[in-house]
Amino acid sequence: MYEVGEYVVHPGQGVCRVEAVTTEPMATYQLLPIGQRHPMRISFPMASESRLRPVLSQEEARRIIEQYPLMAVEDFSAPSATLEEEHYKEQIRRGTCQDTVRIVKTFRKRIADVRSRNKKPPVAFERILKQASDRSLAELAVALDTTPDDVRMLFEQVTGEDPSQN
């Protein structure tokens, strides 16, 4: 059971703060997504608590950032762009922060490869990159008790580049 004030990762909304725990009429968490322009409180049933996961620890966050340059890119491909996009969106929803950072690295590379051939990258690549970047930066920022911009700077220090930008 999560306590009021803790941060959790909601599969659809990303990082949320537990605002309240209610028991009537049914046991629910009142979650407030962080890092969104217009966050709305979410009632999440405690019976589905297994779908939530705690935000990673500060040590885990630092390890992910340090290992970013050595992280392998994903090699998944599907017969259609729609199936591929669905696969990666599901990975972002259900995976760990490390999975999400790997997706950011993957799509940064894919976009750079397409641009190196003087082509415009598919809009789906940009969408996946933005979603994965926003999700991972928010979770890393909470774990490190800092801002997403500071996390970007940590990535820049490790790699000499910004992994959230194209």
Image: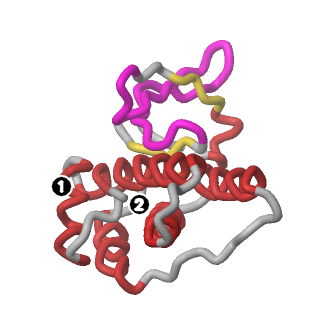
Lower position in the chain sequence, tag 1 or tag 2:
2
* Number of callouts: 2
Image point (38%, 52%), residue name: 139
Q: Residue furthest bottom?
A: 70
Residue bearing the label numbered 1? 150
Residue 100 among magenta residues? no
Q: Nearer the viewer, residue 56 or 136?
A: 136
User: Do residues under tags 1 and 2 come within 8 Å of each other at their CB atoms?
Assistant: no
The x and y percentages for residue 29 are: 54, 29
Q: Nearer the viewer, residue 36 or 59?
A: 36
The x and y percentages for residue 13 are: 52, 36
Q: Residue furthest front?
A: 118
Image point (28%, 52%), residue name: 141
State which quadrant residue 61 falls in: bottom left
Q: Where 138 sits versus 157, above or below?
A: above
- Label 2 sits on a secondary structure element that is loop
- Label 1 sits on a secondary structure element that is helix
* Local crowd size for mark 1, using a 10 Å CA cut-off: few (<14), some (14–19), many (≥20): some
Q: Nearer the viewer, residue 76 or 149?
A: 76
The x and y percentages for residue 50 are: 66, 48
Q: Which mark is residue 56?
A: 2
Q: Where 28 sits versus 129, above or below?
A: above
Q: Amino acid at mark 2?
A: Leu
Image point (60%, 44%), residue name: 11
Q: Where 42 sits versus 64, above or below?
A: above
Rounded to the nearest angstrom, the CA distance separating label 1 from label 2 is: 17 Å
Q: Residue furthest right?
A: 79
Image point (72%, 69%), residue name: 77
Q: Amino acid at mark 1?
A: Asp
State which quadrant residue 71 falls in: bottom left
Magenta-tinted stretch:
12-38
Image quadrant occupied by the C terminus:
bottom left
